[in-house]
Amino acid sequence: MTLQPDSAFPTAASATVHTFQGPLIWKPSMAKATHKEAIVLDASLPATEEKTLTREVTLHGFLNAIIWHRIDVTDCFVIRSKADGRPLERWVEWEAHKAYTYQEAGGEFADLPGGDWWMSFRYQLEEFANRIKGRK
């Protein structure tokens, strides 16, 4: 059985959640958000053309993230004519992100505490304790 509630948000054009009832060997849970089309500034294009971007973010395995999870980011680019909106060129760029610790996530999170053995709840508990104790 699949549950597919669709929602619309001010910052995203649509969102869909897929889940299941049954054994873990079935397709894992999934949440997907498709963002509204946005115009991307590109100085290399002639004044008669514009570039747009539609981003879709998919979170796989959110119900059983300790076993497996992945975040897919799909960017759909279109170069179109400003005069009539006719698409001139299309391409898709795709990235998958997966991190089980702050160190794997890198960037501003790299120095935060954590370990391979921590479950999602442990990270939530750590942040809750930080807020209660007034730590950043």
Image: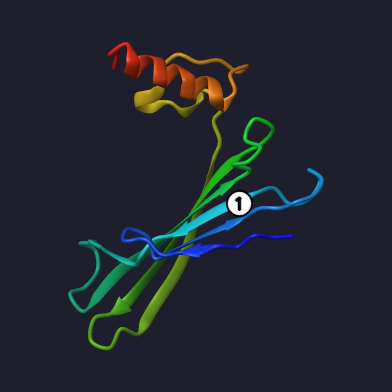
Apparent side of residue 129 relative to residue 31 in the rendered image (left or right): left
Decide if residue 82 is on the left or right side of residue 21. left
Which residue appears at 65% of the width and 49% of the height? 29
What is the quadrant of residue 24 in the picture?
top right
Instruction: Give the image location of residue 76, x and y in percent.
Output: 44, 64
> Outermost residue, front direction?
132
The residue lying toward the viewer, choosing from 13 and 128, is 128
In the image, what residue occupies the spot 60% across and 62% down?
4
What residue is shown at x 24% (from left), y 68% (from top)? 45
The secondary element bearing badge 1 is classed as: strand
Quadrant of res 118: top right
Residue at x-position 54% and y-position 30%: 99
Q: Quadrant of residue 25?
A: top right
Closest to the observer: 16 or 93?
Answer: 16
Farthest residue to the bottom: give it.
84
The image shows residue 11 at horizontal and vertical percentages of 32, 58
User: Across the whole image, how many numbered discs are drawn on residues?
Assistant: 1
- Answer yes or no: is residue 102 visible: no
* x and y, in percent, of residue 36 in the image: 35, 65
Vertical placement of residue 126 versus 106, above or below: above
Sort mark 1 into few (<14), some (14-19) or many (20+) by Cα contacts within 10 Å.
many
Q: Amino acid at mark 1?
A: Met
Which of the image's four quarters has the N terminus? bottom right
Per the image, the residue denoted by label 1 is 30
